[in-house]
Image (tube, rainbow, N blue to C red):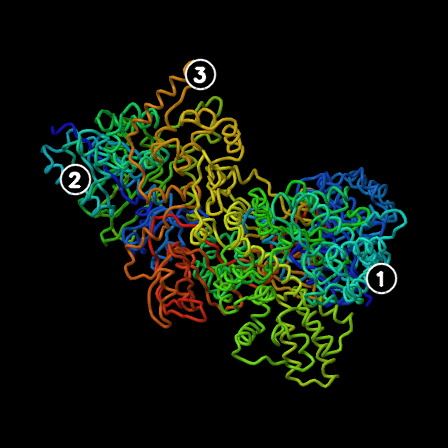
């Protein structure tokens, strides 16, 4: 496609509040208008460039890379990339500017422009540009100076005098001055749109963005808003009309665009090389270490294992991935040598090489995993190896090690593009429209929570929040809500994805300082990086990994060590725990839905755990695979296969496709997909962003199955499975990795309960349940949980004996870490003898002392909490000579404490306010007298099916899964356990606020007993008013 | 009890809610709550008794409150309404005693010396009930009243009142008081709560010295209260004789002269009161009753607050000169809005207006002639919309602020205006309706009642639009045209595309200064 005009100055929404259209929308509109090319010049970065290139590939519009640099004097300079050198220079320049500035501030100095100017073209810019800014002062010589500085930096042939027309007054005069400059300096004029919106109607979003940027609302923004909606993309003919007085400015755009051939294919990215010993290549060294590892892993290197290893090593070498495996292996070695628990997951678990290298813990040959899910000949992108690490400082140590190894600028976290969504979007819109905070608060409260789509139409929700349909701004709010959604808001950092590069990563993508100290983040997110072939290593923090590592350390300290690698996989007690759904605190299988499935699934072997982990996922649920699987497992329906050829593939999952690997195999067997086609299917299944991609592969799959004369029914069923998996597909290898952790945590809960619970409490918040619920669960399993005590507690929770856990000082909210540690040092030096001794040496402030006293942590130093309070509030004036006297005074004071001990209820309140947990009675015990007819959670399990009764409890979990057709699941905790409530969509809508806001609920309904799982299907819901404290609930996650 | 030693404390429970209800009388639901206007979390400040019965309480998040009480009406707290309620209360308590003290918006302390002649609990209880009834009936305000021999005790009595409490046996009474009722601070209250104490009596049972050492000096006040030893001298709040006079005419009046005479007499009286109080009039409120049953009311601002009868009368006279009533007048009420005289050192900081009241008088005449909302200093609005301004009070600070501030436009060439002032535009107000013939989308001929002619040259369109978020978005196109023929000159045309009435119509907005044209080319 060629045209008479090319747009070379465009800000997209990736200019973060300075542009209002997504790059894909800009490309789409450019194609519609007949533009042959489009340059994206976002502010201070190339954030949107990968998406521009991706969208452009489908439309025929040629993408051109550029940016707007913010100069230190405040002017804004657009530059375009001519060559690979120019791109590298631009990335280096942006990186340097970002790393020296604060977050969001990237000043470029005029003096450094020449150093990075090669391969770049400079435009003089718009009203923010250095030249127009000078003209605005009325001093033409300053404009001339600015042009001359640009010429000096970039060379005269690479500087263009930019002209824009937005139908403002004064433009003709300004063009006159700019053209005079161009003539005087022999520079070419260049027409641009100064585009901030794809279409006129996007101006509304742009104005809202302006309000957000300058922190005001539309009524007050005045002339800070755009004066019209003319900064949109225009067709060539219109630009020619607008620039009839200077036609060469339009034709120059085409000439300039032709001289900017750079594309992202020319990135020049290379993965770092692993330094191998002399005489070795990376491939040979990988073979050496793999074989060494295999010999350690496999007791016997049989033919099958050797064949698999040979096949994998050959493919890895052929694809040039040897260095990648070595680098990940080296990272794993770093973790192991620094006593950091690590486990590879993701598709890497399908690889025998990864298993041999110690990256993964599961033998893919024994588990019959599909290697093609990990690597295949058709693979163009790098394989995906994710490392699970203990969350917290241990993972940070690994991240910092990666930065250290690849410094300077060789590694970065991938970005996470935060987009406008849901209530956040409406909150910003409402602020701009000057709605009252109360209205916005109500809108947020009414918003559907969790991943279930909003069941209230936005219009209705606005009305309920107080903005009626007749409100003059309601239509604008609704329009904006639709327009704003999914546009980028700002850049965050990915939770664990790191990218590495041979040489400097900053020549591939600009790097920025992250908000978090010591972190550097790239300007692209993980999808962009993957599209561009940049290798990501995910260093993911898992709370349960930290729990397991802490548990192992506690076990070792207590002389009953455990080796995770050798814990028996057939432990009956562990499976009994799962079958009874006694899995609070267990990785992955502790959620409400998992606990409802476990008694029906009745896991009996490790592979059952793998299935359990994988089956309660949106993919299998939406694909209607859960119930057939459970029915077949229970022998209620026969195991059948859609086609005889599928039996070997689906036999382990009873004829039901549960894993991505199975779908790939089905495609290869039934449709005859080649390895590259299977790879394309894998990418489609993994790419949640693109429905179109999945549909393209589905079309091919359909065609190939028809070619093989398969029936339409079979074809449609297989395609349905594919589409379901495209949403949230779960690979078998991934499930196995998770199942290993799930099994290990369940085993620990059974066999090392004290250590496990202590570690769980030390790593909160994590998982589904609060510390209070975990303590109740521990006590339910016969464990004693001792309260915080300054005479006995360590900073963290500790194990007293096999059946007893002591809460740590860390549970006291008021106590600072430094003061807590100082206290422990003093106690270690000499135990505290009296309250006076404690007060004198612990060095705590009065608030901390009061908190400890209220929490009962001063037991042993005072008879009861109030006596402790009485004593710690006694002013102590201690000097060298009056120490003994002071002791006597305090002893006398304590002897005469006039306060009465706290009641049980008062202790509960004090426990929750100081530690958020209690080792005393459950709050529901105090409310029980108000509920003569309510059944406890334990009683509910004994109730007859279909009986109508009432229960009550403290809400600890509210869930509304996207797959549950609007049903809401509540977990109510009482002194006997947890009861499960199902709330129908209608009932939820009637009591939406009640359910979301009340801490204690009374619910009546019909009991459902199904294969050992008890539910109460709610028919009436009431608040249970109480002033008692409640634990924080896990809501709508 | 002796009759001359009593104090009363008047508490208005749910003051902010009652104030908000004054502003929204339609919301007379029994389930009402008020939230802070600026609070993002919508925490309830006060709730009605009906709502309380449904489990709603102050401090609760609005959404949770709505969950408990679906009919709950949530009102925003209003400072204006609270000030209004405060004024009403002041007026009321002034009728009770010459010595009153406002301790908080919702709390007035009243020195009852010289009030009433009776003695004993029954007498004061009856007095209190009658007082509250009067407050409810006349002002629509619900309140509680406590009477005691000491202000502190009266306050505690008011807090416990249902709705009147007269304290006779002070010692027993204070012991049952809860700390919250005594207004104990949050920290001390929490400490006492931690100790398991809830009433003053509980505290008194502790060893005083030991408790004080632990609780700090604030706790000492509690013992003083218990001993009833706190004396209080009331600060007298603004009040005295009301600065308001009313007359009923013996016969209906139809001409201005007798009215002015009466008003002059009233002003003399009011000004003399103001001299006694060392106050000046910042405003006047004039109300006439008409013999057809209607009323006429008008408020006047006194630009330079004064207590000179002549000055104030001139303000009234200027207004009355042009006034025509639909019926005869049967009475007049004149009220002074008094303020403290401002002190200024005229030699150094002389008022820019030599005689502000004279200026005010002139403005009043102008207002009378052209209309109330047509007098002021035009200040350009912060908008791109053409010729939009607000009329600011010439005497207000707003004018100085607005006219001195320079708006920084966000971008576009409009920001070049500082450099590109161009030709001066003489605006036609109102703009001239015109018929414009177009050729190739450009104006070719302009015809209007005043200016007509062929377009020799044109520049444009210059597009402007805004207010898209409201019910009155606007979009206009401006052209600068050089007309030939008899109306030869440079004009600005405007096509109101949408939003500005009449939509789709052409207007000639003005003509550029002819002294400059045509020697210069169009440069826009």
Residue, x 74% and y 84% (percent of image)?
A708
Q: CA distance from mark 1 to mark 2?
A: 99 Å
Q: Is residue B486 visible?
A: no
Classify A588 as above or below B340: below
What secondary structure is found at the residue carrying circle 1? helix
Where residue A100 sits, quadrant-wise, is top right
A881 or A674, nearer to the observer: A881
Q: Chain of mark 2?
A: B
Residue A1010 percent location from the top left of the image: 44, 71
Where residue A877 sits, quadrant-wise, is top left
Residue B221 percent location from the top left of the image: 29, 27
Classify B126 as above or below A1023: above
Q: Chain of mark 3?
A: A
Q: Name, please, the residue furthest toward the top.
A: A881
Dot 3 corresponds to which residue?
A879
Q: Are marks 3 and 1 on the same chain?
A: yes
Dot 2 corresponds to which residue?
B128
């Amino acid at each position: 496609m060629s045209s008479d005009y090319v747009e070379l100055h465009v800000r997209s929404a990736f200019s973060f509040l300075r542009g209002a259209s997504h790059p894909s929308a800009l490309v789409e509109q450019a194609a519609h208008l007949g533009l042959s090319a489009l340059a994206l010049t976002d502010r201070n970065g190339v954030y949107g460039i990968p998406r521009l290139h991706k969208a452009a590939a489908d439309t025929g519009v040629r993408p051109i890379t550029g940016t707007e640099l913010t100069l230190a004097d405040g002017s804004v300079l657009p530059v375009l990339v001519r060559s690979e050198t120019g791109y590298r220079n631009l990335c280096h320049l942006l990186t340097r500017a970002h790393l020296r500035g604060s977050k969001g501030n990237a000043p470029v100095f005029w003096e450094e422009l020449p150093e990075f100017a090669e391969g770049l073209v400079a435009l003089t810019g718009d009203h923010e540009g250095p030249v127009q800014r000078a003209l605005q002062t009325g001093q033409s010589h300053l404009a001339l100076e600015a042009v001359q500085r640009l010429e000096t930096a970039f060379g005269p042939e690479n500087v263009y005098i930019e002209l824009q027309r937005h139908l403002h007054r004064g433009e003709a005069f300004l063009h006159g001055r700019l053209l005079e400059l161009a003539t005087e300096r022999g520079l070419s004029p260049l027409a641009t749109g100064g585009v901030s919106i794809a279409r006129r109607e996007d101006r509304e979003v742009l104005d809202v963005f302006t309000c957000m940027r300058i922190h005001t609302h539309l009524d007050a923004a005045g002339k800070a808003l755009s004066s019209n909606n003319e900064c949109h993309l225009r067709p060539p003919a219109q630009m020619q009309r607008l620039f009839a007085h200077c036609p060469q400015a339009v034709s120059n755009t085409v000439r300039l665009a032709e001289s900017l051939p750079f594309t992202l294919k020319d990135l020049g990215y290379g993965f770092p090389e692993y330094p191998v010993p002399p005489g070795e290549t990376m491939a040979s060294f990988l073979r050496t270490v793999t074989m060494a590892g295999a010999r350690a892993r496999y007791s016997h290197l049989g033919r099958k294992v050797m064949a698999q290893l040979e096949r994998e090593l050959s493919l890895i070498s052929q694809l040039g991935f040897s260095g990648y495996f070595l680098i990940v292996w080296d990272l794993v070695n770093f973790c192991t040598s620094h006593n950091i628990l690590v486990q590879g997951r993701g598709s890497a678990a399908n690889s025998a090489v990864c298993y041999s290298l110690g990256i993964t813990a599961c033998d893919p040959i024994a588990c019959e995993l599909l290697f093609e899910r990990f690597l295949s000949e058709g693979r163009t992108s790098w394989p995906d190896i994710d490392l699970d690490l203990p969350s917290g400082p241990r993972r940070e140590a690994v991240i910092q090690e990666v930065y250290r190894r690849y410094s300077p600028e060789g590694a970065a976290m991938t970005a996470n593009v935060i987009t406008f969504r849901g209530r956040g979007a409406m909150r910003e819109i409402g602020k701009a429209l000057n709605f009252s905070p109360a209205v916005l608060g109500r809108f947020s409260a009414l918003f559907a929570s969790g991943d279930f789509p909003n069941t209230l139409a936005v219009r209705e929700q606005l009305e309920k929040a107080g903005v009626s349909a007749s409100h003059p701004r309601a239509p604008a709010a609704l329009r904006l809500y639709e327009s704003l959604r999914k546009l980028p808001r700002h850049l965050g950092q990915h939770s664990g994805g790191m990218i590495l590069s041979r040489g400097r990563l900053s020549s591939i993508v600009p790097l920025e300082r992250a908000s978090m100290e010591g972190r550097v983040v790239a300007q692209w997110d993980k999808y962009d990086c993957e599209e561009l072939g940049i290798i990501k290593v995910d260093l993911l923090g898992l709370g349960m990994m930290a729990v397991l590592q802490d548990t192992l350390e506690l076990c070792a300290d207590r002389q009953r060590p455990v080796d995770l690698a050798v814990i028996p996989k057939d432990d009956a007690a562990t499976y009994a725990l799962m079958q009874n759904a006694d899995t609070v605190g267990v990785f992955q299988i502790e959620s409400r839905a998992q606990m409802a499935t476990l008694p029906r699934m009745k896991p009996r072997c490790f592979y059952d755990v793998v299935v359990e982990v994988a089956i309660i996922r949106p993919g299998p649920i939406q694909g209607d695979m859960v119930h057939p699987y459970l029915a077949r497992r229970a022998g209620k329906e026969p195991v059948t296969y859609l086609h005889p050829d599928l039996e070997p593939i689906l036999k382990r999952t009873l004829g039901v496709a549960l894993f991505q690997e199975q779908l790939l195999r089905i495609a290869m067997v039934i449709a005859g997909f080649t390895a590259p086609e299977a790879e394309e299917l894998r990418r489609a299944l993994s790419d949640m962003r693109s429905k179109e991609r999945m549909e393209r592969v589905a079309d091919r799959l359909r065609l190939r199955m028809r070619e093989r004369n398969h029936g339409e029914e079979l074809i449609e069923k297989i395609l349905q499975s594919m589409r379901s998996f495209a949403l949230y597909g779960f690979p078998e290898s991934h499930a196995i990795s998770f199942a290993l952790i799930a099994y290990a945590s369940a085993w620990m809960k059974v066999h090392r309960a004290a250590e496990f619970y202590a570690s769980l409490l030390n790593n909160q918040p994590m998982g589904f349940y609060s510390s209070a619920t975990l303590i109740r669960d521990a006590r339910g399993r016969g464990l004693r949980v001792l309260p915080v005590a300054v005479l006995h507690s360590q900073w963290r929770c500790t194990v007293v004996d096999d059946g007893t856990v002591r809460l740590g000082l860390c549970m006291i909210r008021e106590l600072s870490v430094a003061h807590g540690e100082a206290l422990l040092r003093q106690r270690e030096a000499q135990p505290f003898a009296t309250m006076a001794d404690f007060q004198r040496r612990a060095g705590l402030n009065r608030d901390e002392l009061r908190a400890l006293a209220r929490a009962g942590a001063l037991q042993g130093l005072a008879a009861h909490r109030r006596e402790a309070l009485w004593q710690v509030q006694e002013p102590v004036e201690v000097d060298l000579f009056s120490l003994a006297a002071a002791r006597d005074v305090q002893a006398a004071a304590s002897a005469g404490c006039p306060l009465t001990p706290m009641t049980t209820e008062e202790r509960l309140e004090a426990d929750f306010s100081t530690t958020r947990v209690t080792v005393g009675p459950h709050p529901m015990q105090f409310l029980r007298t108000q509920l003569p007819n309510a059944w406890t959670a334990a009683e509910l399990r004994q109730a007859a099916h279909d009986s109508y009764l009432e229960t009550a409890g403290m809400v600890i979990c509210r869930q509304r899964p996207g797959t549950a057709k609007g049903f809401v699941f509540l977990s109510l905790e009482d002194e006997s356990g947890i009861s499960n409530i199902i709330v129908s969509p209608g009932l939820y809508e009637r009591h939406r606020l009640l359910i979301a806001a009340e801490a204690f609920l009374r619910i009546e309904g019909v009991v459902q007993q199904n294969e050992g799982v008890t539910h109460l299907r709610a028919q009436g819901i009431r608040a249970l008013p109480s002033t008692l404290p409640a634990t924080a609930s896990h809501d709508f996650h | 009890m002796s009759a001359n030693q009593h104090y009363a404390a008047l508490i208005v429970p749910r003051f902010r809610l009652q104030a908000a209800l004054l502003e929204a009388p339609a919301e007379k639901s029994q389930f009402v709550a008020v939230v802070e206007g600026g609070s993002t979390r919508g925490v309830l400040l006060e709730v009605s008794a009906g709502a309380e019965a449904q489990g709603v309480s102050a401090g609760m998040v609005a959404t949770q409150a709505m969950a408990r009480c679906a009919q709950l009406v949530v009102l925003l707290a209003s400072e204006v309404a609270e000030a209004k309620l405060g004024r009403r209360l002041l007026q009321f308590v002034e009728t009770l005693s010459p010595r009153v003290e406002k301790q908080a918006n919702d709390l007035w302390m009243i020195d009852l010396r010289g009030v009433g002649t009776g003695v004993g609990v029954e007498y004061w209880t009856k007095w209190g009930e009658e007082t509250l009834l009067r407050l409810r009936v006349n002002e629509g305000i619900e309140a509680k009243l406590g009477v005691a021999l000491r202000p502190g005790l009266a306050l505690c009595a008011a807090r416990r009142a249902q709705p009147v409490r007269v304290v006779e046996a002070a010692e027993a009474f204070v012991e049952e008081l809860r700390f919250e009722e005594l207004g104990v601070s949050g920290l001390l209250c929490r400490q006492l709560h931690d100790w398991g104490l809830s009433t003053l009596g509980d505290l008194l049972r502790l060893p005083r010295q030991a408790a004080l050492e632990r609780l700090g000096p604030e706790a000492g006040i509690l013992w003083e209260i218990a001993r009833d030893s706190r004396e209080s001298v009331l600060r007298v709040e603004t009040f005295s004789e009301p600065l308001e006079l009313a007359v009923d005419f013996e016969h209906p009046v139809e001409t201005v002269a007798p009215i002015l005479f009466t008003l002059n007499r009233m002003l003399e009286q009011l000004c003399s009161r103001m001299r006694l109080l060392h106050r000046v009039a910042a405003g006047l409120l004039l109300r006439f009753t008409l013999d057809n049953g209607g009323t006429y009311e008008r408020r006047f601002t006194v630009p330079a607050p004064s207590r000179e009868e002549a000055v104030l009368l001139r303000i009234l006279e200027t207004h009355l000169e042009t006034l025509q009533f639909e019926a005869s007048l049967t009475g007049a009420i004149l009220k002074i809005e008094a303020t403290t005289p401002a002190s200024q050192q005229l030699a150094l900081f002389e008022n820019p207006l030599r005689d502000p009241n004279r200026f005010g008088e002139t403005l009043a005449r102008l207002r009378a002639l052209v209309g109330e909302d047509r007098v002021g200093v035009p200040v350009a609005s912060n908008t791109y919309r053409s010729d939009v301004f607000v009329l600011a009070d010439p005497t207000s600070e707003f004018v100085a602020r607005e006219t001195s501030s320079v708006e920084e436009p966000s971008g576009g060439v409009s920001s070049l205006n500082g450099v590109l002032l161009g030709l001066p535009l003489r605006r036609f107000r109102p703009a001239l309706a015109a018929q414009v013939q177009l050729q190739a989308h450009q104006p070719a001929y302009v015809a209007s009642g005043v200016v007509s002619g062929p377009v020799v040259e044109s520049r444009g369109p210059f597009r402007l639009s805004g207010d898209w978020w409201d019910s009155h978005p606007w979009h206009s196109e401006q052209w600068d045209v050089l007309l030939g023929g008899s109306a030869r000159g440079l004009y600005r045309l405007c096509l109101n595309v949408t939003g500005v009435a009449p939509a789709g119509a052409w207007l000639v907005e003005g003509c550029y200064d002819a002294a400059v044209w045509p020697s210069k080319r169009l440069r826009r």
